[in-house]
Amino acid sequence: MAEITPYSVLPDGVLSREVSEARFKKLFDEADAMSIQGYLPDGTVVYWNQASEKIYGYTAAEALGGNLLDLIIPADIRSEVEGAVHWMFESGQGIPAGRLELKHKNGHSVHVHSSHTVISIPDHPPILFCMDADMSSLVRAESELRIAAAAFESQQGMFITDANGIILRVNQMFSQITGYSAEEAVGRTPRLIRSDYHPAAFYETMWQSLLDNGFWQGEVWNRRKSSEVYANWISITAVRDSKGQITHYVCSQIDITQRKDAEAQIMHLAFYDVLTRLPNRRLLLDRLQQAVAASIRNQNVGALLFIDLDNFKTLNDTLGHDVGDRLLQQVAERITACIRKNDTAARLGGDEFLVMLEDLSQNPQEAATQAEAAAQKILEALNQNYQLGSQNYMGSVSIGITLFSSQGNSSVDELMKQADLAMYEAKSSGRNSLRFFDPEMQAAVTFRAELLTGLRDALREQQFRLYYQSQVDAEGHITGVEALIRWERPGLGLVSPADFIPVAEESGLIQPIGLWVLETACRQLACWAASPDKAKLTIAVNVSAIQFNRADFVGQVLAILQRTGANPQQLKLELTESLLVDKVDNVIAKMSELKAQGVGFSLDDFGTGYSSLAYLRRLPLDQLKVCRRHIKKICSIRMCVSYVA
């Protein structure tokens, strides 16, 4: 059988290759409605029919040998077209047909609907054929129909008026938004939905913009048929005839009431506390900044009250967070009821509240009296009984007060710190009270900060010293010593433990300091073991509750004893009653573990308020140091008993 090729003359009369090519060439060349171009992979033009000359302005002679990208591709889509051409030659497929905005020889835009195909013939380079239909007439028609199409956009309420503003037509969404049917709206003017929210000048400006620019858009509050006022985003376009005269107005409106409500809710979440609905820290700081500026302008005084609930954590832990939340809500209500409308109550978070009092007297003394009266009113209101579900609760608060005026130069941050310091002073004085900020408070805070920095330096530079105070028996014989830490601060001499120990405990530095004391004392014991007159002496070392409560405390003590070689039986650890507030079983377990290794224990200041004889008998103590006041109390009781007897 003879070989059959695509262009062979077959018995059934199929056209030869030459005849087929001639006919297709004539068809392509004279296809007046379809621009057909052929391109090589690098974009070189190899085919350009008559319709292409008409649409793009280049003759075939000008186009052939040129490059697609240079001839008809606008600069802004050049890289995109390059990528598409590359992909089509790589894949052998055309990209989906679609509308394109290409470039005419003279630079104006050419709108076409373009389709593409890659033709590959053996022994010939592949050719990309682009077939473009001129869409210019359609684009013009679309432009002319844009107003009509937009007028009935389903997502927008639309109405069309004549040049005098008489409504000619409305769409269904307009009726849905406004409540007015087409029959009720047609023949009326847009005043039908106008509210009293905007002044007359607002509408005058709107219509002047329409006359000058042919367009206006903005937010307008309109009124529905039900009388409800709602927010609209409105766009109005003036339609002109060929002579430039306005013939119609097209108005689109979008109901943005829900969006406005959502914005208000977001704003509320951003600036208000969710639980109490009071302003939050962010809003308070903004108002405080404005109030400080106003006090400078108006030469008056304001006040900031820092309110903290006493024992709130205990309430939360014992009764639960739900009960705690109810308390916070009631506290917010009571504070709000105590202040004036122009004052601000805010919740900082947790159980902390702030009240800002504005427009107090210009006289600082009178302003202080006014602030104190307001704070006292709040204090009394918050000290009343609370009904928290089934629970009755009597609470108390501590309030710190600081003043601000044109005479002061404190920043907002400094005012917050001052009020906070005053509040802590109120707590320190016994709670359920109020205190004004005093510069001495700031001095105390500054001193504490300096002390903390110095303590870190003291640890690093070994500035601590141990002194040993003798312990004697009834006959005056020395049986042991108590290790007393002293801080020799360069340039300042000895710093009292009463000053730096509380700071060390608050900051957590008591842990490394306590370990240093323990190890130094144990090294001293090991050293005395070689001296006959001191070999039997014991050393008592004070241990803070923070240090003792660490999970690894027992291991630390045993490691120090092993490292220093000290005799455990000559080490006595002094504990305070505060250690016995809770977790007594855990305390006893640790004491027993160390006691088994020979370490002794002493309870310091027995009788200061924590001890219970019920568990005192369970403690593996070697020594009980009774508080002097407790001894006097016992003696007075004995005297009374004797007198009665």
Image (spheres, helix red, strand yellow):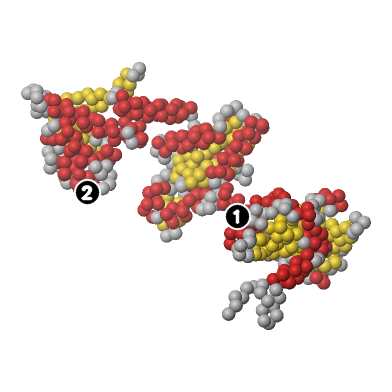
Nearest the eye: 384 or 443: 443
Foreground mark, 2 or 1?
1
Residue projecting furthest to the top: 491
In the picture provided, is 433 more to the left or to the right than 228?
left
Residue at 42 percent of width and 54 percent of height: 321
Residue 265 - label: 1
Residue at x 78% of width, y 54% of height: 61
Q: Is residue 162 above or below residue 416?
A: below
Residue at the image point whose x is 16% and y is 44% from the top: 592
Tell me which numbered mark, 2 or 1, is placed earlier along the sequence.
1
Instruction: From the viewer's perspective, tell me whether residue 537 is left or right of residue 448.
Output: left
Q: Residue furthest right?
A: 243
User: Which secondary structure lies at badge 1?
Assistant: helix
Mark pair 2, 1: CA separation: 52 Å
Q: Tell me, yes or no, if residue 300 can be seen here.
A: yes
Q: Is residue 544 left or right of residue 398?
A: left
- For label 2, the crowd category at 10 Å Cα-Cα, with few meaning under 14, some 14 to 19 and many 20 or more, is few
**On the image, numbered disc 2 is attached to which residue?**
585
Residue 267 is situated, as x and y percent measured from the top left of the image, at 60, 51
Q: Quadrant of the C terminus?
A: top left
Asked if 231 appears above or below 26 in the picture, the reply is: above
Q: Is residue 643 left or right of residue 284?
A: left
